[in-house]
């Protein structure tokens, strides 16, 4: 092979490598790159139901409005060294004689929190109706938890949310709320959105309720005559739990308590590693 032909081949190889490196973001994909270049958040995680750690309820509160809507909120804390995965939370309602007021079918209200990192506090809640019975107390229990070693979730970090505003499209139903928030994910890949939790507090900061709802969902509010009052017609540019930042919203099915101070609203996106 002549030197001229060898020079041409070398030049072609250099150009191809340069193009691949450019596409790969400045690293050699077959070499794996540095730890900072790779996304080490797994698609799936596995753990044990019995593990070192505990999830506890550190704060709770509820409100029953005149229309019978019951809004229950709680703050959970993971005091262990492992990741609490798919934590099941139950909400039980009782009357003044401590007789349970179960849901239809006899089952309690249940919410699943996808991920609670060690040392993290996270909000959860649920809403329902008891139009004929006064709710006197609520008990919140922690059910099954799968414990996962922290190094098994890679560089995962909780997705955060900052409250933006609350809209009320029907003045005759002020507890019907459309809550906007700014969500931020610093994770190296998109995650799967389960739901989003909201906590409500009064002007003194007391927890007065909560709930969960699917974010990003288009909705139209109507009055009693069926006239459109407004709503959400366009989904955000990127879905909840995707990388980056977006403004999005949730509409809690049972609304917000009448005693809630909008400015104290707290939002907690429930993001998971996969949809399964």
Image: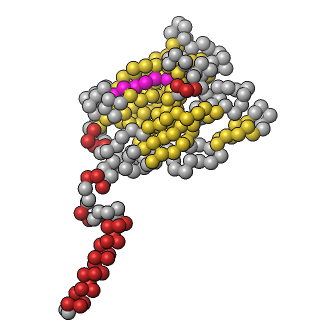
Q: Count the marks: how many? A: 0
13 relative position to 198: left or right: left
Nearer to the camera, 186 or 46: 186
Whether residue 35 is visible to the viewer of this picture, yes or no, is yes
- The picture quadrant where one finds residue 90 is top left
Residue 89 placement (x, y as % from top left): 43, 27
129 relative position to 158: left or right: right
Residue lying at the far bottom of the rendered structure: 2
Nearer to the camera, 230 or 82: 230
Whether residue 102 is visible to the viewer of this picture, yes or no, is no
Residue found 30% across the figure and 72% down from its top: 17
Residue lying at the far right of the rendered structure: 225
Secondary structure that dominates the magenta span:
strand
Residue 70 placement (x, y as % from top left): 58, 21
Location of residue 145 with respect to 41 vertically, above or below: above
Residue 132 placement (x, y as % from top left): 65, 15
155 relative position to 63: left or right: left
Position of the C terminus by quadrant: top left
Position of the N terminus by quadrant: bottom left
The span shown in magenta is 70-78
Residue 77 magenta-highlighted = yes
Location of residue 240 with respect to 9 vertically, above or below: above
Nearer to the camera, 259 or 182: 182
Residue found 28% across the figure and 33% down from its top: 82
Residue found 39% across the figure and 45% down from its top: 186
């Amino acid at each position: 092979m002549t030197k001229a032909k060898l020079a041409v081949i070398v030049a072609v190889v250099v150009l191809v490598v340069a193009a691949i490196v450019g596409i790969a973001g400045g690293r050699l994909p077959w070499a794996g790159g540095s730890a900072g270049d790779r996304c080490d958040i797994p698609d799936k995680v596995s753990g044990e139901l019995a593990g070192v750690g505990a999830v506890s309820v550190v704060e709770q509160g509820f409100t029953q409005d005149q229309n019978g809507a019951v809004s229950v909120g709680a703050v959970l804390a993971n005091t262990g060294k492992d990741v609490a995965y798919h934590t099941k939370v139950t909400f039980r309602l009782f009357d003044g004689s401590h007789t349970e007021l179960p849901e239809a079918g006899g089952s309690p209200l249940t919410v699943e929190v996808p991920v609670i990192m060690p040392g993290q506090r996270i909000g959860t809640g649920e809403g329902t109706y008891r139009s004929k019975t006064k709710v006197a107390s609520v008990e919140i229990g922690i059910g099954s938890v799968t414990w996962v070693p922290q190094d098994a979730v890679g560089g995962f970090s909780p997705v955060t949310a900052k409250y933006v505003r609350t809209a009320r499209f029907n003045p005759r139903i002020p507890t019907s709320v459309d809550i906007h928030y700014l969500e931020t994910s610093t994770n190296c890949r998109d995650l799967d959105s389960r739901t989003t939790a909201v906590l409500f507090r009064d002007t003194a900061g007391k927890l007065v309720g909560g709930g969960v709802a699917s974010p990003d969902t288009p909705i139209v509010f109507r009055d009693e005559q069926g006239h459109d009052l407004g709503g959400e017609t366009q989904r955000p540019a990127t879905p909840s739990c995707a990388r980056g930042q977006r403004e999005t919203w949730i509409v809690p099915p049972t609304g917000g308590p009448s005693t809630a101070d909008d400015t104290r609203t707290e939002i907690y996106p429930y993001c998971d590693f996969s949809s399964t």
